[in-house]
Image: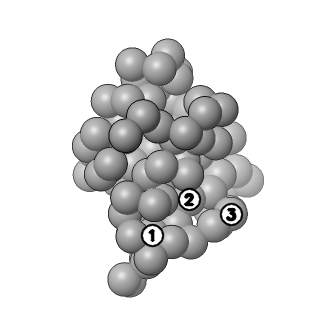
Amino acid sequence: MERHELVLALLEAGQPPESFQVPGVHEHVPVPAGCWFLRQAGPRWEIGVYGQDRYDVREAFDSEAAACACLFEVLVGVPPLE
């Protein structure tokens, strides 16, 4: 799964659009507090929560696919279907 597929899968799973942000695909201005994010950080990918005007990174991954799968599971409660 890549980030464009992630956004579609989250919306199809019923996630509110304001509950997550994926730069270049699904963004908010301003970013709502409590919004989960996926972002690239150099060669790695990070997921976390935005709050109190800062990004709180919860996990980092070596691949976009692994980060997308993790964020999907965090938000939906089940792993994405392969």
Who's the residue at 65% across and 52% down the image?
49
Marks 1/2 in contact by CB < 8 Å: the verdict is yes
Who's the residue at 61% across and 33% down the image?
78
Q: Amino acid at mark 2?
A: Ile
Say whether disc 1 or disc 3 marks the residue closer to the N-terminus. Answer: 1
Who's the residue at 45% across and 44% down the image?
21
Residue indicated by mark 2: 47
Tell which of 76 and 24 is nearer to you: 76
50 versus 40 height, above or below: above
Q: Secondary structure at mark 2?
A: strand
Residue indicated by mark 1: 45
Real-space Cα separation, disc 1 to disc 2, in angstroms:
7 Å
Q: Is 52 left, or right, of 38 in this rendering?
A: right
- Residue 4 in sight here: yes
How packed is label 3: few (under 14 Cα within 10 Å), some, or many (20 or more)? few
Residue indicated by mark 3: 58
Marks 1/3 in contact by CB < 8 Å: the verdict is no
